[in-house]
Image: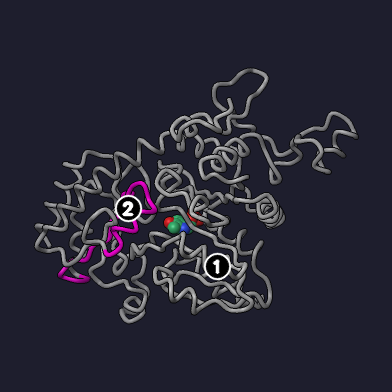
Amino acid sequence: MNTKNKGFNTKLVHAGAYEDVFGSAVTPIYQTSTFAFQNAQHGADCFAGKSDGFIYTRIGNPTIKAFEDAMAELENGVGGVATSSGMAAVSSVYMALLGAGKHIVCSASVYGPSRGVLERDFSRFGVEMTFIDTSDIQQIKNAIQENTTVLYIETPTNPTMQLTDLVEASKIAHKHGITVVVDNTFSSPYLQKPLNLGCDVVLHSVTKYINGHADIVGGVIIAKEQDMYKKIRASMVYLGGNMDPHQAFLTHRGLKTLSIRMDKAEESAMKVAQYLENHPKVDWILYPGLKSHPQHELAKKQMSGFSSMISFGLKGGLDAGRTLMDNVHLALLAVSLGGVETLIQHPASMTHAGMTKEAREQADISDGLVRFSVGIEDAEDIIEDLDQALAKV
Ligand SMILES: *Cc1c(COP(=O)(O)O)cnc(C)c1O
C-alpha cells in the first residue's frame, strides 16, 4: 500500500510493508544470509544496482528493508539504514562524514559513548572535535572552523534535558556547507521531525521509544538526500554494523504502536512531573512540558509533544538518591529508556559512580540527580510508588 499521502498513524502501521507472494499481513522474518540469483545476468544486475533484488543480508534483506522504508517515510527522508545498535548508527555516520583533518562540532552533553567514540577512537585517526552547549546558538557560531564538516546535535539531551533550536542551528551550519546530524532518540519522529526543520541526517537508538519493549538493541539512520543516503549506507555495509532480520521484525512490530505508547507515557509523565515539582524533598526538576523548563517555548515550537523523560534533583544528594533507589518497587532500577516499563536511574550511585564528584559536576551530573523514564503503567501507581519511596528519603 502506498502510504505517502496518509497520516502518521496510518504510516506507522502500513509504511514499508514488504509484499510477498503469499500476501502475508506482516512482513515475515527472512532468516537467510544470502539470496540466490535467477541467472548470471540477474546477479550482475543486482550488483550494478540495475535490479532491486537482494544479494546478502549485510547489504540488504526484505525484513530489514521493510523497517528501513517505514522509518524513512516517518522521518520524511529518502532512505533508512538499520544498524545493530544505536552506537553502530552513530559510528557509521561519523565514519561516513569524518576523516583526517576534518572537524566536528558536537553537543557536550550527548549520550556518553557518542562523545566517547570521538575522543577515544576518531581522534586517533586525525579527526578534530569541539564540544559545546549547542542550545546556545552563539557557541555554535564560535565553534565553526574552516575544516568543520559535521554539526552533531542531541535534543533534548540526556540527562540534562537541554534543547537546541534545530531551525537556527541548520541555518548557520548550511552557510558553511556543514552537514547537520540529529540524534532523535528522545523524541522519535512522532514528536519531532528534524529533516523537516532543515537538518540533513537523523538517527536513533531504536532500543528506546521506536521498539519500546526493552527486548532488543538496535539503531537506524535516515538521510534527507540520495547522495548522503548512499554514502552512509556504503559505510555501514563495509563496517558491518547491520541490523539482523529477527531484530528488524521485532523493532518493526514495536514501531506500529509508537504513537499510542508515547501518548500514554507523556500523559503520565506530565502528572509525575507536576507531582515532583510540588514535592518538598525535590530540589529541582527538568521536564520540557513544564512551564518551569527554561526552554518550554522552544519545546512547544519544534516538538509536537514532550515525551516522557524527566530529570530531577533530590535535596539530600547522594544518600537521598541511594535511598530512593532502594525503596521503589514499581520502577525498575535500570539504564535505558523509552520502554513500556517505568525505569529509574541515579547516575551518582550507579552509571557514573566510577567518576569523581568533580568530574560528575563538570558533566552537570549532581549527586542528587535522578533520571526517570515514565512507562505506560497507570500514572497513579507510578506516583504512589515514588511517594512511598520519597517518604523514606
Ligand atoms: C541509548 C542511546 C544511544 C545508544 O544506543 P544503543 O542502542 O544503546 O547502542 C544513543 N543515543 C541516545 C540518545 C541514547 O539514548
The residue range painted magenta reads: 294-318
- Other residues around mark 1 within 10 Å, as few (<14) / some (14–19) / many (≥20): many
Decide which of 280, 229 is in the foreground and name it: 229
Q: Is residue 302 magenta?
A: yes
Q: Which quarter of the figure is the C terminus placed in?
A: bottom left
Q: Position of residue 357 (x, y in %)?
A: 30, 79
- Amino acid marked by disc 2: Lys
Which disc is residue 173 wearing?
1
Q: Position of residue 294 (x, y in %)?
A: 27, 65
Is residue 158 left or right of 80 when viewed as pictured? left
SS under mark 1: helix
Q: Position of residue 85 (x, y in %)?
A: 54, 52
Q: Is residue 52 visible?
A: yes
Decide which of 57, 108 is in the foreground and name it: 108
- N-term mark: 2 or 1: 1
Q: Is residue 246 visible?
A: no
The residue that appears at 49% across and 75% down in the rendered structure is 141
Q: How is the image coloured?
A: one colour
Is residue 65 left or right of 312 when viewed as pictured? right
Q: Are marks 2 and 1 in contact (CB under 8 Å)?
A: no
Which disc is residue 346 wearing?
none
Is 321 situated above or below 48?
A: below
Is residue 274 left or right of 124 when viewed as pictured? left
SS under mark 2: helix
- Amino acid marked by disc 1: Ala
Decide which of 268, 226 is in the foreground and name it: 226
Give the residue number, with chain letter if any, for mark 2: 300
Q: Position of residue 10 (x, y in %)?
A: 47, 29
The residue that appears at 55% across and 21% down in the rendered structure is 25
